[in-house]
Amino acid sequence: MQDQKDNIGICIPQKSERKRRIYALGVALATLFLLSIAFFLQPSTDGVGTHQQLGLPQCGWILAANVPCPTCGMTTAWSHTVRGELPSAFMVQPLGMLLAITAFLVVIGGFVTACTGYSFQPLLYRFPPSRIFVFLITAALVAWGFKILLHRGVL
């Protein structure tokens, strides 16, 4: 494969086709492993606490201040999402549901790249990283606020 120049003229070596396919397969398998763990966990009916089935402690924020942490409900949302229970997943942790769906897409994309060599690079670089970062931070804050309102019984 030929080296390519970026927009300021610096030569960037391209990964070989084989390395890219192996890397994509590794990403797909690692992500599939995470989704598999979520499948084998039983979603908590409280909307939090599913992670305790992995031997992790109860959320310290809820114990100390009766306020869920920003990631409260993520494991439960993943567990609902892998079962196709999207409304339940959304009500538990909206960002967790979106991340689990994204993980499904990563698995599919990784296997497509591994099998065909197709590159999703143009899609990945469609938006500047700064916009993606701002979107993710905003989504995390909105999801956290939603989770706090759920926990307090407002919603």
Image: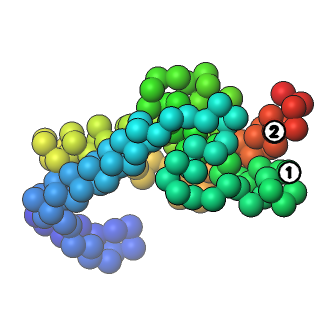
Q: Which quadrant would residue 4 be assigned to in this image? A: bottom left
Crowding at dot 1, Cα within 10 Å, few <14 / some 14-19 / many 20+, comes out as: few
Image quarter (top left, top right, bottom left or bottom right) of the N terminus: bottom left
Q: x, y (%) of residue 121?
A: 32, 51
Question: What number is the disc on residue 6?
Answer: none
- Count the labels in the image: 2
Q: Which residue is at 68% across, 55% downward?
A: 58
Question: What number is the disc on residue 151?
Answer: 2
Tag 1 secondary structure: loop
Does residue 87 sit above or below 23 in this rendering? above
> What distance separates the C-alpha of mark 2 from that of mark 1?
8 Å
Q: x, y (%) of residue 66?
A: 85, 51
Q: x, y (%) of residue 122?
A: 35, 48
The answer to whether the residues at label 2 and label 1 have Cβ atoms under 8 Å apart is yes
Image quarter (top left, top right, bottom left or bottom right) of the C terminus: top right
Question: What number is the disc on residue 66?
Answer: 1
Closest to the observer: 30 or 75? 75
Amino acid beneath label 2: His
Tag 2 secondary structure: helix
Q: Which residue is at 52% across, 43% downward?
A: 99
21 lies left or right of 147 = left
> Which tag, 2 or 1, sits closer to the chain's start?
1
Does residue 88 sit above or below 22 in this rendering? above
Crowding at dot 2, Cα within 10 Å, few <14 / some 14-19 / many 20+, comes out as: some
Q: Which residue is at 67% across, 36% downward?
A: 47
Amino acid beneath label 1: Asn
Q: Which quadrant would residue 27 be assigned to in this image? A: bottom left
Closest to the observer: 62 or 84? 62
